[in-house]
Image: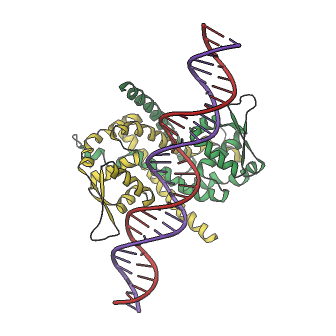
Chain colours: A yellow, B green, C red, D purple
Amino acid sequence: MTTAPDTPTTDWLRLDQQICFSLNAASRAFGGVYRVILKDLGLTYPQYLVMLLLWEHGDLPVKKLGEHLRLDSGTLSPLLKRLETAGLVRRERSTRDERSVEVRLTEEGAALRDQAVQVPRRIVAATGFDVDEIRQLRSRLDELTTALDAATAAETETAGRRT
Amino acid sequence: MTTAPDTPTTDWLRLDQQICFSLNAASRAFGGVYRVILKDLGLTYPQYLVMLLLWEHGDLPVKKLGEHLRLDSGTLSPLLKRLETAGLVRRERSTRDERSVEVRLTEEGAALRDQAVQVPRRIVAATGFDVDEIRQLRSRLDELTTALDAATAAETETAGRRT
DNA sequence: GGCCATTTAGTTGTGCGCAATTGAATTGTG
DNA sequence: CACAATTCAATTGCGCACAACTAAATGGCC
């Protein structure tokens, strides 16, 4: 494995060397596991994330959900509508700020938590990693996300200046 | 930080402890960087991956593209149609096996490679990681993907048996 | 108080990811 | 050769992600 100083562009363009591809593949592989495990709960993975937040924090406005999940209303509005149709959630305009919509668990939604508590354990088992390895990988990925977000902001800004 | 032996289920359900969430976030953060950088080329990230394969291997049937990218025809067919509309690619039924469709670069598609060679370098810069760190993270993620795929297969099978 | 920028959800449109189905071509088997 | 099983691409339908836009409510400033 000689990394010659004049590494040709071919190597840089090789698919199997691109970190993003591995990341993407892992993310979709997770999707497959979650799809099977969450099928019994009738939830998709993003819906499951919303339910996690509500179980942990209680009622939340759409805005807060979006901040936690890095999602905007374009994604959340229809998703929450589906959760509402499924009877897991209600949406109510806040009385003290009518712009805001409070998302509340229904009895049924709160009860679903009992079915969900076993999910993380099954996921961890599916990874074949131990808890320490997972924590380490997680912190690495979080670093990466932070760096990428900063880069996006920078790129977008310079792109804006070029206009 | 006491991890009590009787760790309650609450901890297991915490969003910020779930590896998949970090992974997902990183994947979408990458999406943001690629979106900005690929804008000049007029490509989305999945389209860029297809082009990478064609630049590296030359003409490929849809089947092979799907194997490399872990994507099925449901995703690739419309994507390739868009690349064809953009004039980067042609699709031709194979003569020796009429089921297969060969995807070929047009002159324009081949020429786009010159614009693309700088992309990986900019991506690496955006991560803030050095090449070794990236390689290490990549191999970790590939392990994870392998384990998860195996788990999905196992879960799907047992789910199938329950039917 | 009146006006304007900001905040918050929702809507629309585009593209990806995947399951399920369809239809045509090919391969295997008797 | 005939027929069944398999392969391959395309299509349909659903849900997510994101950009761009709309509409309503709020807050700050004069």
Give x and y (percent) for residue A114. Answer: 25, 42
Q: Is residue B21 left or right of residue B80?
A: left
Q: Quadrant of the C terminus of chain A?
A: bottom right
Q: Is residue B1 left or right of residue B75?
A: left
Give x and y (percent) for residue B74. Answer: 57, 40
* Residue at position x 59%, y 45% in the image: A18
Find residue C9 and report its image quarter.
Answer: bottom left
Give x and y (percent) for residue B158. Answer: 38, 26
Find residue B63 and report its image quarter.
Answer: top right
Q: Nearer the viewer, residue B56 or A111?
A: A111
Give x and y (percent) for residue B39. Answer: 63, 59
* Residue at position x 67%, y 49% in the image: B83
Q: Quadrant of the N terminus of chain A?
A: top right
Residue B40 higher or lower than C23, as above or below: below
Whether residue A46 is visible: yes
* Residue at position x 67%, y 56% in the image: B41
Q: Nearer the viewer, residue A25 or A65?
A: A65
Q: Is residue A40 left or right of residue B63?
A: left
* Residue at position x 40%, y 45% in the image: A45
Whether residue A6 is visible: no
Marks counted in the figure total 0
Q: Is residue A28 left or right of residue A17?
A: left
Most distant residue in the left direction: B6
Residue B149 higher or lower than A88, as above or below: above
Most distant residue in the right direction: B107
